[in-house]
Image (cartoon, coloured by chain):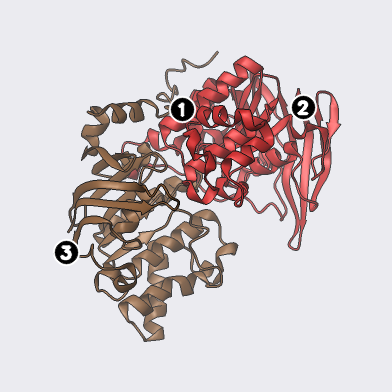
Amino acid sequence: MLSVSQLSKSYQVRGWRANAVAAVENVDFELARGGSLGVVGESGSGKSTLARMISRLVDVTSGRIVFEDADISAISPSAFVHRPERRKIQHVFQDTGENLTPHLTARAAVADPIRRLVGVTDEEEIRAKVDALAASVALSPDLLSRYPHQLSGGQKARVGIARALASNPDLLILDEPTAALDVSVQAAILKLLHRLRSEFGLAYLFISHDIEVVRLMCDNVIIMRLGRVVEQGPTRQIFEDPQSDYGRTLLAAVPRLKAKAGATGDAVA
Amino acid sequence: MLDVRHLSINFSTRRGTVKALDRIDLQIVPGEIVGLVGESGSGKSVLSYAISGLLDSSARVASGEICWHGNVIGTIRERRATRAAIAQIFQNPRASLNPIMTIRRQLADVAGEGQVSALLESVRIDPSRGNHYPFELSGGQCQRVGIALALGCEPELLIADEPTTGLDVTTEAAIMTLIRDLSVRRGMATLLVTHNLALAAVHCDRIVVMHAGQIVECAPADRLAYAPMHPYADQLLASVPQHSATAEDLRTVPGLLPDLAGPLPPCRFASRCSRHQIDCDEAPPPLVALAPAHFVACRHPLC
């Protein structure tokens, strides 16, 4: 469904030393319909730039993005808005608090893509669709009339996901969807995303710096560092036997809780 | 060094009085790294702001006090003597840096020009980045600059509010090693506010668990991580992704935090608790030592 080859993005830096900064360099991957690919790497490794290129929010410097047999890499972000693919690729942003329009209620935020991208005009139909989406993401209907500042972090995350699902996408790009949430809420959102993937037949491109989250959510994984892919393959394989030095370092650095003592009671003084 | 005694803080809002902290007792000694964990809304940040003296004027101290080296210090915004001694790393890194000053100037401001390169290197940022403005750095880099700024004042107590969210694990480990190193070398104490229990378990000496403005459990890190006694601490631990093999196995803490502006039960966890019994509603559970250095506020603890 999605095939990315030799994708690169460089930013021109101002000043007389006009060296371009390579944010993403020569990234290749394939993502099948219904598949899930995790992208992990440190901050500044180009994960978000990669995601933004695929959802066509930033220009591509070189390389190809082929989505359902159409090369979308050459389309400018402003022209992409009018393309049929726009509806099929949806982005769930990093900070749930800052990406919801502050003066739109949750209902209006979710209704907007139904109106603009799907082209539904019948208000009754839009209403019913928003209600159904709210039910899918387990957002209680009385919260739909609230504004973003009246919602908790977890509720805002649910609104962001419902909004992304509103245009019946095939590919969901999730950029750190749980980074701002605490563990318990994160667990609830991850479960929700896992369920929605099979329910809606979605493919996920899941950006996260949390390797444990990627392990739970993704079949395949890419490890990025300084804009380059250092390792890619099936999640299980990379977790059990990372091949690159950086992959090994990354996995070794995860703070781990040992298996809970519980039954053995070895921690009881 | 730091002694928080029976501290209760209320906020007056249009909706009524929000009882944000309820009788908090917390001591920190030099060189100690204390983890403060709990859900969002549990009062972790309010407590850390109270210690830094950064609460705004809608905060009211209903009871208790904070002592710093034996002297009572205020919790509400004031210029006080502890400004350099207690440093805070803020949650939102980009918003806490000055957008129109280069990184170098901001660091030079607190630590002096000569220290800038060393500080940047200590948080793994190339010193040549010093001439950049915050908007030119990634979120993680801004966060590390925030950490360098806090460490630049050579504090006696570092309050780190989610210092490593958004950083990858290798940088996170480097930052925590740096903090540990400073606590060993200089006796710097650290209050690590986080919801990452695995991080707290690995890097802290002691973990304090907060729920709805109350401390529910306080224990040495390895005891809390492997043998929690409060039902809330236990459920919080179970929701860590590491404990699940697949996404379906993930567990969440049932229910929601109680509304802190409304009437509250004596034990604020009661409505979410599976071990709740009638005597829980009689009086607030006292924080008692159930094992050496292991304090739990529950009438029906686990184990």
- Of the 4 image quadrants, the one containing the N terminus of chain B is top right
Could you say which quadrant of the image residue A233 lies in?
top left
Q: Which chain is brown?
A: A
Query: Which residue appears farthest toward the right when viewing the image?
Result: B71
**Residue topped by disc 2:** B3
Q: Is residue A61 left or right of residue A137?
A: left
Q: Which chain is red?
A: B
**Residue topped by disc 3:** A68
Residue under the point 55% across and 34% down: B233
Q: CA distance from mark 1 to mark 3?
A: 41 Å
Q: Are discs 3 and 2 both within one chain?
A: no
Q: Are discs 1 and 3 both within one chain?
A: no
x and y percentages locating residue B102 in the rendered image: 58, 45
- Is residue B227 visible in the rendered image? The answer is no
Vertical position of residue B53 compared to residue A158: above or below: above
Chain at numbered mark 1 = B
x and y percentages locating residue A111 in the rendered image: 42, 75
Graded by Cα atoms within 10 Å as few (under 14), some (14 to 19) or many (20 or more), the crowding at tag 1 reads: many
Residue under the point 50% across and 59% down: A156
Q: Is residue B138 left or right of residue B21?
A: left
Graded by Cα atoms within 10 Å as few (under 14), some (14 to 19) or many (20 or more), the crowding at tag 3 reads: some
**Residue topped by disc 1:** B173
Q: What element does badge 1 sit on? A: helix
Q: What element does badge 3 sit on? A: loop
